[in-house]
Image (spheres, helix red, strand yellow):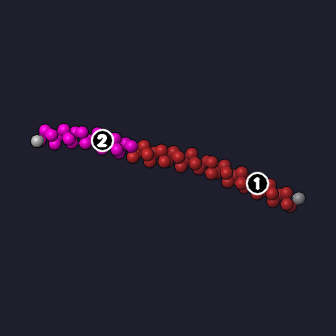
């Protein structure tokens, strides 16, 4: 019985480590996704701002 429990613990350890590793990878992927999303947002705001500037300059002239 003791041997069965020991082998079960040994088998449970890697699966737990794999789960933890997977969760870390998931959060890491989310961070990368957010970081890659920020520049596109900034670029969008930049083009939006320049477009508004162009419209306002055209209206003034």
Q: Is residue 29 left or right of residue 56?
A: left
The x, y position of residue 8, in whole percent, is: 20, 41
Residue at position x 67%, y 54% in the image: 45
Residue at position x 40%, y 45% in the image: 24
Q: Nearer the viewer, mark 1 or mark 2?
A: 2
Q: Residues within 10 Å of mark 2 (few under 14, many from 20)?
A: few
Q: Is residue 12 left or right of residue 28?
A: left
What is the C-alpha distance between the residues marked 1 and 2?
53 Å
* In the image, farthest residue toward the right: 61
Residue range (magenta): 2-22
The answer to which image quadrant residue 49 occupies is bottom right
Q: Is residue 45 left or right of residue 5?
A: right
Q: Report which residue position mark 2 lands on.
A: 15
Q: Is residue 25 above or below residue 41?
A: above
Asked if the residues shown at circle 1 and circle 2 are in contact, with their CB atoms under 8 angstroms apart, the answer is no
Of 32 and 19, nearer the camera is 19
- Residue 4: say if magenta: yes
**Circle 2: element type:** helix
The circle drawn on residue 1 is: none
Q: Residues within 10 Å of mark 1 (few under 14, many from 20)?
A: few
The x, y position of residue 26, in whole percent, is: 43, 46
* In the image, farthest residue toward the left: 1
**Magenta region, main secondary structure:** helix
The answer to which image quadrant residue 36 occupies is top right
Q: Is residue 41 left or right of residue 27?
A: right
Q: Report which residue position mark 1 lands on.
A: 51
Residue at position x 39%, y 46% in the image: 23
Q: Which quadrant is home to the C terminus?
A: bottom right
The x, y position of residue 32, in whole percent, is: 51, 45
């Amino acid at each position: 019985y003791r041997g069965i429990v020991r082998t079960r613990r040994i088998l449970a350890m890697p699966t737990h480590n794999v789960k933890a590793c997977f969760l870390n990878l998931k959060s890491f992927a989310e961070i990368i996704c957010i970081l890659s999303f920020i520049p596109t947002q900034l670029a969008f705001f930049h083009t939006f701002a320049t477009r508004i500037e162009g419209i306002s300059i055209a209206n003034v002239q």
